[in-house]
Image: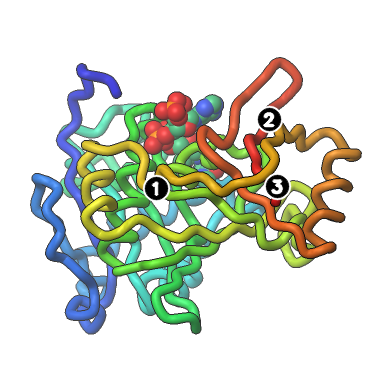
Amino acid sequence: MNEDFQFDLIPYVLTHQRNVEHLDLDVDIGEEIRVLCVEEDQNAEFCAILNRSNQQAFGGPDSMGMPLWVMLDCAILPSAVVGFMVHSDEAPEEILEKLDVDEDYDGYVPVSEYCACPTVEPGCFSGFSLHSHLVGHGIATKTKALALAIYGAKTQIGVTQFYNPAIRVHVRFGAMEMIIHRPSVHTYPEDSFVYRLHLPEKEQLVQMARGDDVFGHRDLPEGMRWDFDPDNEVMQGRLARHLQEGGRAWLIPPGWRANEDGCELHMVLD
Ligand SMILES: CC(C)(COP(=O)(O)OP(=O)(O)OC[C@H]1O[C@@H](n2cnc3c(N)ncnc32)[C@H](O)[C@@H]1OP(=O)(O)O)[C@@H](O)C(=O)NCCC(=O)NCCS
């Protein structure tokens, strides 16, 4: 973590007023958590900037950028978008430009975001968006940890891509069990997998959100270690067969590493 990091990061929870009593806001990360309610018009510009921020991070509307209505229907209304923001006076110029923030805007600018919504399984949340615009300072890890603590999540499912360095963030919350290899129902089916996490307890999530602890669970599943190359179709076939035959597979820390040919994933097969 960079000692010179100079931004005053303020945690925010964007939701609907009716959800507030169901969220666990008794979370001490050293900064007051600001609750922004979507029905208040004064938060409309923040929501618009947040959506542009998501679009920037996920390749825009033709890729995996979140339509504004999805942000409302699937994130804000059933749950909350959680992240960190900085005041526009303090936001780096390149972020203001990237997010197309009006010159006369005087308010908060989101620099990170996590969204997950509850599933039919009690305690299980489906995570569908994580991004950070101040990369390399542990902000994505803190953001995800804070959100999961506030939701009261016990387990989490999500989809990511083999090539995405965010795997290094997700794997800090436990061994990621691969439950669907290359889901056919996805914008990028060949590059994706569905994973499931048994999350650390709230206290540990709060430590992670504070930046005092980088890893949650340390227990690793037993089995055969495997450095997996997603560009290698023989390995992809072997992984698919292993899962089809009832085998299990997990990604374990550090989870993902770039190499000269692309990347490798750190796995355990059982
Ligand atoms: C991936 C992303 C969320 C990381 O945000 P961040 O705030 O830098 O994340 P953190 O600092 O908490 O942790 C980053 C970890 O990933 C690594 N990492 C992040 N981006 C990386 C990259 N491009 N190449 C290699 N490693 C990278 C960091 O080195 C760090 O690991 P380490 O501390 O073990 O070295 C951010 O780059 C992003 O918003 N990407 C675009 C959206 C996206 O793909 N989201 C993931 C959806 S599943």
Callout count: 3
User: Which of the two discs, 2 and 1, sits closer to the camera?
Assistant: 1
**Vertical arrangement, residue 34 with respect to residue 94, above or below:** below
Q: CA distance from mark 1 to mark 3?
A: 18 Å
Residue wearing tag 1: 217
Under mark 2, the amino acid is Glu
Cβ–Cβ under 8 Å for marks 2 and 1: no
Colour scheme in use: rainbow
| Left or right, 254 with reference to 106 | right
Identify residue type, mark 1: His
Residue at image position (70%, 40%) is 224
Disc 2 target residue: 264
Residue 200 x/y as whole percent: 35, 55
Q: Secondary structure at mark 1?
A: loop
Answer with left or right where residue 57 lies relative to residue 143.
right
Q: Secondary structure at mark 3?
A: strand
Would residue 99 be found to the left or right of residue 87 on screen? Answer: right
Disc 2 from disc 1: Cα separation: 22 Å
In this view, which residue lies farthest toward the front?
222
- In the rendering, which numbered label is found on residue 269? 3
Q: Earlier in the sequence, mark 1 or mark 3?
A: 1
Query: At label 3, which amino acid type do we have?
Result: Leu
Query: Between 164 and 45, which is closer to the camera in this rendering?
Result: 164
> Viewer-nearest of labels 3 and 2?
3
Which residue is located at x 60 percent, y 46 percent? 222
* Residue sitting at x 51%, y 45%: 220
